[in-house]
Amino acid sequence: MSVPLTRFKSVRVRDTLLTAAGTAALHLSAGRTLDSRRDGGVTFLRMKKNLKIIAAVLFVAFIAIQFYRPARENLPIIPEQTLEATTQVPENIQQTFRRSCNDCHTSNTDWRWYSNVAPVSWKMVEHVEEGRKELNFSVWATYTTSRKLKKFDEICEEVTSKAMPLDQYVWIHWDVKLSDEEINSICEWTKKESEKLAAMP
């Protein structure tokens, strides 16, 4: 049985067209993939450049803020005015205060190295100034009796509620955190001293 020549021609044309279409599709797909990769590469490079700019700006800003240095002062201490000179303070309480309280509540702050680095230095100076204003063991003798009684109550209340030492201070100095035993000792001491003070004429 003979097959018409025109059929062979149509089949060959069809196959040729299919092959050409497939080849074109492959080239188009490859082109899109290359374009996609090229666009992704450009985006990555752009992001990398922006990150470098941001890092440079932050670095310059960090250097610039170092030029603002708030005063870090340790005021002169008159020994006769201190808490220890005017009140009976057991040695264990003194040790606890030295470790956990005196940096912000005396005029003898230990200004550690990071107190020279802004913006940490700004916050530390602020905390010390506020702490001394609220309670300063270095000038305890200058307080009135009513203020001393109030401060004794507040000391126990602050350590019991764990408001003191400040969380920010504990984060940096993990060893200043008070134990339950230390808190109980402080409260027993403040109660005893309050009673003695209240009984004085």
Image: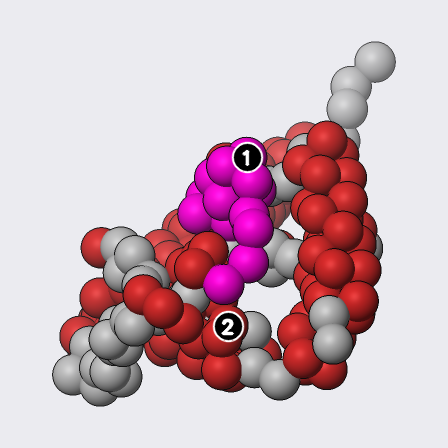
Q: Where is residue 76? Give x, y as percent.
A: 24, 75
Identify the residue at image location x=56%, y=74%: 135
The image quarter in which residue 196 lies = bottom right
Q: With 77 as the anchor, is 5 left or right in this view?
A: right
The answer to whether one can see residue 107 in this image is: yes
Q: Residues within 10 Å of mark 2 (few under 14, many from 20)?
A: many
Q: Residues within 10 Å of mark 1 (few under 14, many from 20)?
A: few
Predominant secondary structure, magenta span: helix
Q: Is residue 45 above or below residue 66?
A: above
Amino acid under disc 1? Asn
Q: With 62 as the anchor, is 172 left or right in this view?
A: right
Identify the residue at image location x=78%, y=19%: 2
Identify the residue at image location x=56%, y=82%: 143
Give residue 92's mark: 1
- Pick whichever, 201 or 47, lies toward us: 201
Disc 1 vs disc 2: Cβ atoms closer than 8 Å? no
The answer to whether one can see residue 65 in this image is: no
User: Looking at the figure, which quarter contains the C terminus?
Assistant: bottom right
**Tag 1, which secondary structure?**
helix
Q: Which residue is label 2 attached to?
A: 140
User: Looking at the figure, which quarter contains the N terminus?
Assistant: top right
Q: Is residue 108 above or below residue 15?
A: below
Q: Where is residue 105? Give x, y as percent.
A: 48, 66
Q: Is residue 28 above or below residue 106?
A: above
